[in-house]
Image: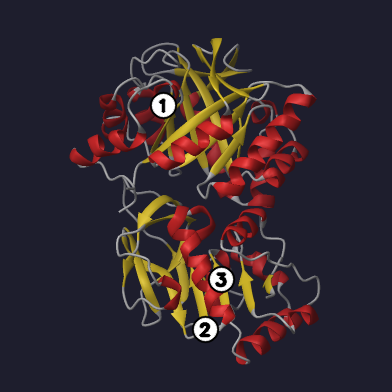
């Protein structure tokens, strides 16, 4: 089975590939949008500034949307999740994909809490869903980010840092995680395996 | 609620974990990949691998270690020691590091922080500060594994590192390193209170109480230790139980 890892130059793909290898799949990295045509799953990773997502130009956006419309599961990780929403205050002129309602804002906290939000924090399962199959409420996962989306109807698990925010979003076969499942121990690998199961249909 | 992180540091020389006192007198503590596995089972939150050698052969051995560790352990991995250029950082990240730790190099080339942060993101750039107390509430930054004093003040350097794009500060007390007499909570609180990025306290861990102190009076976001984990009978999970019983949030 082919699952594509979309490389748009935002950080290091090695950890995500290793995480999926532990989940039983070797990801392929397409060099053109056309190569998405026969993929059973799409993964959009990413770290850093929201502006980096502008590297995903109209041709990539169209190819990704076309696969999603055909029922292919999509997983966004960290910046990749933020890109699934309408946009981010970090780069207001750059639109997200708009597959999931919501927008990222800079996290607002008071001392002693800090931004960026770095470290292990607990998932508060809301509605759950296929990506969170077998993941218990209170499971801790590894975050590193400064922007986040508010809890919305598509938020299947929240976390709290100053205020609750969306840690996992899912609408049908489109899912996103604000944390790094590839750095979140066994529970993270479990979520990657859940995504592989979604891709297997 | 965000957990306080416990980080194990593996000082690696010629492929073996070693640990010194006050940065000197290294003794052997075993195979790095083996220790990394043990810590992972015990519930460590992150690993730092510091290369305390500089030869090319040793570097290659280190890359193998990083690769082995990152393939099977799914927790954040920081690599440091001798990272002076973008090429050094790229080699560590390509081998499987999630973050690189910079120590001496940015002291003479502070723009290196910004260059790496814009390429890999701030979350991948840790600035390590080795500080020694030089008066009341004043700590001076040392370069070259604590051997070379600089003119920089630790708090000011931490602020500058943050401004230049560092994602975290790894703050080591040279006075306490390897002594097991407790973290320098005054140093840690001064730095942690002056920056908005996380501060990892290092140097001096000896007892469970020391960790409690650095997370409370020291205001640390994370605590790093080497010998207390390498040679101690107290595994990480016991330390976490101790902290949790005292209302310190930890990952379990």
Please, which chain is the residue tagged with disc 2 on? A
Are the residues under badges 2 and 3 in a single subunit? yes
In front: mark 1 or mark 3? 1
Residue B90 figure quarter = top right
Please, which chain is the residue tagged with disc 3 on? A
The residue to which callout 3 is attached is A76
The residue to which callout 2 is attached is A173
Disc 1: CA contacts within 10 A as few (<14), some (14-19) or many (>=20): many
The residue to which callout 1 is attached is B229
Which residue is more in the foreground, B110 or B224?
Answer: B224
With A176 as the anchor, is B236 left or right in this view? left
Inter-mark Cα distance, 2 to 1: 43 Å
Q: Is residue B245 above or below residue B145?
A: below
Which residue is more in the foreground, A76 or B95?
Answer: B95
Q: Is residue A180 visible?
A: no
Residue A148 figure quarter = bottom left
Q: Residue at x 46, y 32 (%)?
A: B8
Please, which chain is the residue tagged with disc 1 on? B
In front: mark 2 or mark 3? 2
Inter-mark Cα distance, 2 to 3: 11 Å
With B22 as the anchor, is A4 left or right in this view? right
Q: Position of residue B79 (x, y in %)?
A: 61, 36
Q: Residue at x 74, y 36 (%)?
A: B88
């Amino acid at each position: 089975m082919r699952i594509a890892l979309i490389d748009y130059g935002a950080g290091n793909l090695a950890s995500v590939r290793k995480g999926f290898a532990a989940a039983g799949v070797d990801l392929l990295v397409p060099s053109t949008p056309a190569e998405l045509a026969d993929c059973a799953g799409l993964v959009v990773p990413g770290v850093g500034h929201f502006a980096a997502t502008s590297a995903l130009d109209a041709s990539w956006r169209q190819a990704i949307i076309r696969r999603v419309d055909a029922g292919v599961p999509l997983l966004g990780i960290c910046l990749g999740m933020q890109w699934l929403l309408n946009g981010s205050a970090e780069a207001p002129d750059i639109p997200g994909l708009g597959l999931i309602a919501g927008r990222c804002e800079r996290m607002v906290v008071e001392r002693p809490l800090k931004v960026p939000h770095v470290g292990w924090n607990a998932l508060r399962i809301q509605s759950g869903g296929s990506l969170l199959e077998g993941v218990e409420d209170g499971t801790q996962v590894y975050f590193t980010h400064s922007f986040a989306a508010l809890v919305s109807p598509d938020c299947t698990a929240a976390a709290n840092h100053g205020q609750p925010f969306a840690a996992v979003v899912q609408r049908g076969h489109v899912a996103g995680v604000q944390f790094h499942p590839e750095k979140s121990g066994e529970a993270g690998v479990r979520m990657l395996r859940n995504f592989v199961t979604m891709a297997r249909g | 609620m965000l957990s306080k992180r416990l980080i194990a540091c593996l000082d690696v020389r010629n492929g073996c974990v070693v640990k010194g006192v006050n940065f000197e007198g290294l003794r052997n503590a075993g195979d790095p990949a083996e220790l990394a596995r043990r810590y992972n089972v015990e519930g460590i939150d992150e690993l730092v691998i510091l290369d305390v050698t500089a030869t090319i052969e040793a570097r290659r051995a280190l890359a193998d270690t990083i690769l082995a560790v990152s393939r099977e352990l799914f927790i954040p991995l920081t690599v440091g020691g001798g990272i002076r250029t973008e090429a050094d950082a790229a080699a560590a990240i390509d081998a499987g590091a999630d973050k690189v730790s910079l120590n001496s190099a940015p002291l003479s080339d502070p723009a290196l922080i910004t260059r790496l942060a814009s390429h890999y993101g701030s979350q991948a750039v840790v600035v390590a500060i080795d500080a020694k107390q030089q008066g009341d509430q004043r700590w001076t930054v040392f370069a070259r594994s604590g051997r070379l004093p600089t003119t920089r003040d630790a708090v000011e350097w931490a602020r500058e590192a943050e401004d230049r794009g560092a994602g975290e500060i790894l703050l080591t007390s040279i006075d306490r390193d390897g002594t097991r007499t407790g973290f320098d909570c005054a140093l840690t609180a001064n730095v942690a209170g002056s920056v908005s990025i996380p501060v990892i306290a290092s140097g001096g861990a000896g007892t469970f109480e020391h960790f409690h102190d650095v997370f409370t009076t020291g205001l640390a976001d994370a605590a790093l230790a080497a010998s207390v984990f390498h040679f101690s009978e107290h595994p990480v999970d016991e330390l976490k139980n101790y902290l949790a019983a005292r209302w310190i949030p930890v990952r379990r």
